[in-house]
Amino acid sequence: MAAETGQSQSSSKYDRLIAAARAVPPVPTIVVHPCDETSLRGAVDSAQAGIIRPILVGPEGKVRDAARKFDLDISGFEIVDAAHSEDAAAKGVELIHAAKGEMLMKGSLHTDELMRAVTAKAGGLRTNRRISHVFVMDVPAYAETLFVTDAAINIFPDLDAKRDIIQNAIDLYTQAGFGAAPRVAILSAVETVTSKIPSTIEAAALCKMADRGQITGGVLDGPLAFDNAIDPEAARIKGIKSEVAGRAQILVVPDLEAGNMLAKNLAYFAKADGAGIVLGARVPVVLTSRADTPRARMASCAVASLYANARRQHAPTIAA
């Protein structure tokens, strides 16, 4: 019975997210190189749900062939022809600059190809904020929707990069409607500061940066080990008393390797779904994977849609 209750609680997390996205206007979305079933179906399903309004950018013949092969109706979508995946990424970014879309969505090209176009110093979508990735995770055994950052973009982020990574995640949490003042756990191997583990020192510095107003909108604590970040009893046993310990909503990892392993452990051991979104660019970027469930793909579009709607009045400054 407990397992059934947990599954019911879990299924409602993404359901609520998708329902909220359906309640706002569909966001014009540039879908880059949707030339396989997974990426094209994700765009079609999200469009049919009223979450996005897709513009498909890629080799038109390949896009139409995929639609025919997998019986996907794209008759109402604009298609912008591109020679290949790299050209599709470049044209997708150009369409954002031309105000044709408010989101980018990854199709069947490699993440690096898309992100090279997004992060290009000339003609890219950089802002004055470091670009970072967030997994919005629906973990059946955890009451909260859990953010994990950064597990896909910044390999070994320094202190300044981590400041932006945390701020990006807080802004997504608050502006996409998850709630106010999220509890942010800065993870390390241990919960005490020690010179032998540099990530504990950075965690302590980030907390002090929040005290000084350099990070705003969330409640930070760290260093915290994973167990006492998400389990109240583990925090109690260690004698940790804070608003965050045992109740974290955002988990900030030391580096990409740790984040990627944590997210995949949650996906494969805890049967979590993960909706991926890139932040800090001019527009949110939806990163989907061939391994994503249809529900996770739609949730990725939903969270990006909610964020894009919230940011319409607060566009970030484009870096020179």
Image (cartoon, rainbow, N blue to C red):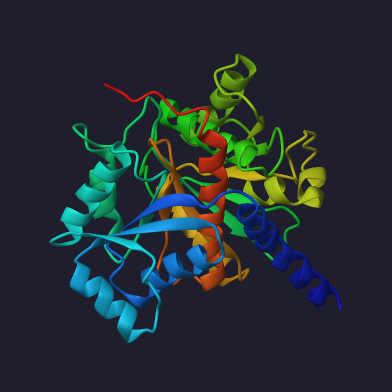
Q: Quadrant of residue 69?
A: bottom left
Tell which of 32 and 170 is nearer to you. 32
Looking at the image, residue 169 lies above or below residue 66: above
Q: Quadrant of the C terminus?
A: top left
Horizontal arrangement in the rendering, residue 187 relative to residue 145 (left or right): left
Rendered residue at 43%/50% (across/down): 28
| Percent of width and height locating residue 157 | 39, 36
Looking at the image, residue 124 lies above or below residue 226: above
| Percent of width and height locating residue 32 | 30, 58
Rendered residue at 48%/55% (across/down): 276
| Percent of width and height locating residue 9 | 77, 65
Q: Among all residues in the image, which is located at the extreme top?
A: 212
Q: Among all residues in the image, which is located at the extreme right?
A: 1
Looking at the image, residue 195 lies above or below residue 189: above
Counting every numbered tag in the picture gives: 0
Tell which of 13 and 314 is nearer to you. 314
| Percent of width and height locating residue 234 | 76, 50
Q: Among all residues in the image, which is located at the extreme front?
A: 76
Rendered residue at 77%/70% (across/down): 8
Tell which of 32 and 72 is nearer to you. 72
Rendered residue at 57%/37% (across/down): 310
Question: Would residue 249 be visible to someone looking at this image?
Answer: yes
Question: Would residue 262 be visible to someone looking at this image?
Answer: no
